[in-house]
Image (spheres, rainbow, N blue to C red):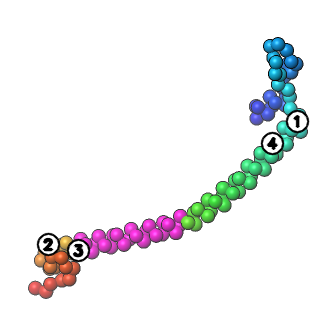
Amino acid sequence: GASTLLSVFWFFSDTKSDENPDPMKRIALKTCLTVWVYNLLWFVAQDIAKVLLYYVMSRFRKEEEDEMARRQMQRRVAGAIEADARAGRAAGYVREGSSTSVAR
């Protein structure tokens, strides 16, 4: 915003002098508009690419999350089986090192 206005409506001296050996000159309004249009077009193109990439990544992430949920459920079941076996051994229903029940 402000830099565009300064570059188009530059009000300082643009004459070469000892104090100002390299004066800054205004840029044409047409040049300014060309730069803005170019930048806006690339902004839109990059935003579309970003949205597409997020969509693709979310599809892969969904598969990953499903796999993680399946593994977590397997760990829970394995933990429950182990806890049950420990409780059975403590109560004397299961032999040490075995997961089969012993009739008493």
The x, y position of residue 20, in whole percent, is 81, 17
The answer to if 62 sits in the magenta stretch is yes
Identity of the amino acid at label 4?
A: Trp
Quadrant location, the C terminus: bottom left
Counting residues from the start of the chain, the first of labels 3 and 4 encountered is 4
Instruction: Name the residue beneath numbered marker 4.
Output: 36
**Which comes before the other along the chain, label 1 or label 4?**
1
Q: Which residue is mark 1?
A: 29
Please state which amino acid type lies under the numbered disc 1.
Leu
Left or right position of 70 against 77: right
Question: Label 2 neighbourhood size at 10 Å, few (<14), some (14-19), many (20+)?
Answer: few
Q: Is residue 89 visible?
A: yes
Residue at mark 3 to residue at mark 1: CA–CA distance? 80 Å
99 is higher (above) or lower (below) than 31: below
Magenta part of the chain:
61-84
Q: Residue furthest top?
A: 18
Disc 4: CA contacts within 10 A as few (<14), some (14-19) or many (>=20): few
